[in-house]
Image (cartoon, rainbow, N blue to C red):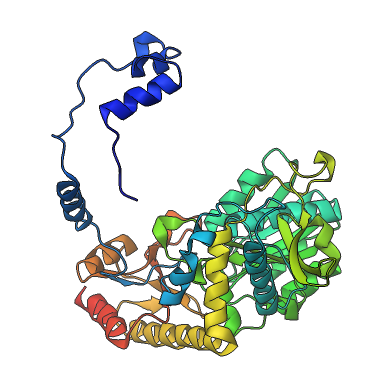
Amino acid sequence: MPFIPTTEKEEQEMLRSIGVEKFEDLLETVPEIIRFHGEFNLPEPASELEAFQLLRRLSKKNHSVQDYACFLGGGAYDHFIPAAVNHILLRSEFYTAYTPYQPEVSQGNLQAAFEYQSMISNLTAMDVTNASMYDAGSALAEAALMAYHVKSRPELVVSKTVNPFYRDVLQTYLHGQNIRIQEIDLSPDGTTDLTRLQKIISDKTAGVIIQHPNFLGNLENVQEIEAITHSAGSLFITSNDPISLGLLAPPGAYNADIVTGEGQVLGNPLAFGGPYLGIFSVKQEFIRKMPGRLIGKTVDSAGRPGFVMTLQTREQHIRREKATSNICTNNALNALAATVYLSLLGKQGIQEVANQCLQKSHYLAEKIAAVPGFELKYSAPFFKEFVIKTPIPAAKVITKLRERKILAGIDLSKFDYQLENALLVAVTEKRSQAELDDFVKGLKAL
C-alpha cells in the first residue's frame, strides 16, 4: 500500500477536530525528560517516483527462493503455489475480513471455512476439523492442553523427534499449568525410542505426542506407538505434513485421537516465517473439548442452505470455566489459501505433489551418499527430508553452496540433538533435476 502524506492544512483540520492546537499537545502525557529534542538524521524528502526507485534499489539487495534453489525445510517449505490461489485470496471480500470469528460473519467466509474443514477432514481421515489455528506449534500445544482436559492426567510424553520450535511453544503453553512434560530421546535410526516410551508411559500420561514424518524427515512406527499409547489409556497426538498424506496413510487410519499440522505447504508462501496455518482435527467424541471454532451447515426457516458458527470455545464467548482455549483468531485467509489450493489440485494432484517430493528427495539422497566424505545419517525411511553427515561443519557447507545460489539446508548443530556436521535437506516438487545435480556438484567441489 503506498504512503499518502497529509498537507499541513489537513493536519491542522484534524487537530482542531480533536480539540488541540498543535501536535505536541498530543504528547502531554509523555514526560519532557524522555522526549527526543534533537534533529532526526533523515534524507531530503523524495517524490513518489524517487521513493519507489530507491525502494526497488534496496530490494535488489535481498535474495529469495525466486533467486536461489531452496533445500530448506524444518517446518516451512518452498512448494509451488498456483496463480489462482492469490487471485481468489486477494478479492476484497476475503482480503479485508481480518479475523472472522463474529457470529455475524458473512456467508461467503463461513462457507470457505466449512469447505476448509471438510477438505482437511478428508485429508487426515478424521471426524472433525476446526476452522484452523495460528500455526503447527500452537496447534500442537493446544492439542496437549486438550489431552490434559480430556484425561485429567498430569503428564505428557513428547518425542524429541518433534520439531524443536514446536516443543518450545509447548513448554511456553504449559508453563504454569502444573503439567509435567517428559521427552523421549531418539533411537539410532532417528525415530522415537519405543523401548523408552514403554518404560515411561503410565496411568498418569494424558497423551503421547509425535511428528510424522518427524523433524529429521524420518517416518515413525505409528502403528506401534498407537498401540503403546492406547494400552495406557492415553491420547495419541500427531503432527503431520499435509502433503505427505498424498502418499502416506492418514492419521485417522492408525487411530490418532488428535491430529495437528502445518498448513503453510497448502498454498501459503514462506513469507519470512508467517503468518502460517495450524491444522487441528479430532475424533467426534472429543468435539466439545476442541479449541477454536467450528463452522456448520444448516437450513434457514425457508429451507435454504446456510452456514453458521456452530462452536466457539474461547473465554470471550462462553463462561471462563467452560472455555477450552483463549486462542483469538483462526488465520482465515491462510485457511482460504489452503482451501483453494486443495480444490485446485484434488486427490490426484496432492498424490502427484507428494510423489514428486518422494522421488526427488530419494534421488538427491542417493547422489549425495555417493560423494566421498558424505553419507546419510539415518537408515529409516523418509518422505521429503533427510539428514546427511558432512566431512566439515554443516555451516561451512551452507556458506559455500550459497555461493552457487543454493540454500543447502539446516545446520542441525544449533538444536538439542548433539549432532555435529549434520545437514537437514528438504526437497519439494519445485526442484528440477538440474538443481539436484548442481547441489551434488557443489558438494563435490568442497
Residue 80 appears in view: no
Residue 426 appears in view: yes
Which residue does the image show at 31% across and 82% down from the upper left? 436
Task: Name the foreground residue: 416 vs 60.
Answer: 60
* Relative side of 194 to 163, left or right: right
The x, y position of residue 119, in whole percent, is 65, 76
| Quadrant of the rendered image containing residue 128 | bottom right
Which residue does the image show at 75% across and 61% down from the upper left? 308
Task: Name the foreground residue: 315 vs 190.
Answer: 315
Which residue does the image show at 42% across and 14% down from the upper left? 30
* Relative side of 239 to 163, left or right: right
* Relative side of 78 to 147, left or right: left
Q: Total marks drawn?
A: 0
Which residue does the image show at 21% across and 25% down from the upper left? 40
The quarter of the image holding the C terminus is bottom left
The x, y position of residue 174, in whole percent, is 68, 45
Task: Name the foreground residue: 13 vs 96.
Answer: 13
The x, y position of residue 42, in whole percent, is 18, 31
Task: Name the foreground residue: 112 vs 215.
Answer: 112
Q: Is residue 349 above or below residue 178?
A: below
| Quadrant of the rendered image containing residue 433 | bottom left
The x, y position of residue 372, in whole percent, is 29, 81
